[in-house]
Image (cartoon, rainbow, N blue to C red):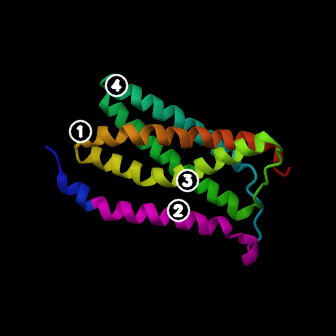
């Protein structure tokens, strides 16, 4: 049975979360714990971990799509829930890193610089846009509104995959410039 009320019930929460997460991340990105007298070592070990988390997310997303195409709905559900958990873990590590470390400047010159910033800007913008898409897609599945779930998933999947893959690409491009 389809549950139309579940979508309605979560719609305000989806809007709130979709606004609050980017705002909180933007604010925390600018907060350095040392500025508040918190003597904490930079968490400089985190970028390769959160980049790997992005890579795993990409693999899980593809695996989840293959699972549903092969009629393995329970596996698909578990993989999608795992992908969301990985994205949350990424976000926590990303914020923790930036609250304890100075931002790294990209040192590349010429065309590679433009390519890097294009990838970075599209990654950031789509990482913001993907939040409500993922939440709406997930709630539609929970509500068993599979017709509507499938429709939005066709938009959500490639964008989320792009965000996950470009997260790895951005890391690989900037990693030579990290302070050691």
Where disc 3 sits, the SS reads helix
The magenta-colored residue range is 10-38
Q: Which mark is residue 22?
A: 2
Judged by depth in the image, the label closer to the viewer, 3 or 1, is: 3
Q: Quadrant of the N terminus?
A: top left
Judged from this view, the residue extending furthest toward the right is 180
How crowded pointer 3 is (Cα within 10 Å; few <14, some 14-19, many 20+) is rated as few
Q: Residue under circle 3?
A: 125
Q: In screen coordinates, is 135 left or right of 121?
A: left
Relative to 150, residue 140 above or below: below
How crowded pointer 4 is (Cα within 10 Å; few <14, some 14-19, many 20+) is rated as few
Question: What's the CA distance linking mark 4 and mark 3?
Answer: 29 Å
Relative to 3, residue 20 above or below: below
Where disc 2 sits, the SS reads helix
Question: What's the CA distance linking mark 1 and mark 2?
Answer: 29 Å
Q: Residue placed at 34% from the left, 47% from the top?
A: 138
Judged from this view, the residue extending furthest toward the left is 1
- Determine which quarter of the picture holds residue 112: top right
Q: Residue under circle 1?
A: 147
Judged by depth in the image, the label closer to the viewer, 3 or 2, is: 3
Q: Residue placed at 25% from the left, 55% from the top?
A: 7
Judged by depth in the image, the label closer to the viewer, 4 or 3, is: 3
- Asked if residue 20 is among those painted magenta in the image, a careful observer would answer yes
- Asked if residue 4 is among those painted magenta in the image, a careful observer would answer no
How crowded pointer 1 is (Cα within 10 Å; few <14, some 14-19, many 20+) is rated as few
**Which mark sits nearer the N-terminus, 1 or 2?**
2
How crowded pointer 2 is (Cα within 10 Å; few <14, some 14-19, many 20+) is rated as some
Q: Residue under circle 4?
A: 69
């Amino acid at each position: 049975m389809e549950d139309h009320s579940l979508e309605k019930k979560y719609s305000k929460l989806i809007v709130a979360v979709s606004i609050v997460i980017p705002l909180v991340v933007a604010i925390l990105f600018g907060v350095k714990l040392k500025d508040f007298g918190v003597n904490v070592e930079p968490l400089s070990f985190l970028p390769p971990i959160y980049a790997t988390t992005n890579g795993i997310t990409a693999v899980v997303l593809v695996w989840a799509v293959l699972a549903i195409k092969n009629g393995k709905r329970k596996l698909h559900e578990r993989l999608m829930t795992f992908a969301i958990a990985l994205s949350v873990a990424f976000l926590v590590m990303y914020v923790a890193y930036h609250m304890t470390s100075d931002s790294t400047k990209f040192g590349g010159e010429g065309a590679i610089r433009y390519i890097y910033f294009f990838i970075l800007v599209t990654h950031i913008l789509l990482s913001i846009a993907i939040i409500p898409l993922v939440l709406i897609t997930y709630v539609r599945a929970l509500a068993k509104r599979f017709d509507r779930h499938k429709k939005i998933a066709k938009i959500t999947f490639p964008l989320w995959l792009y965000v996950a893959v470009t997260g790895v690409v951005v890391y690989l491009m900037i990693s030579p410039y990290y302070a050691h």
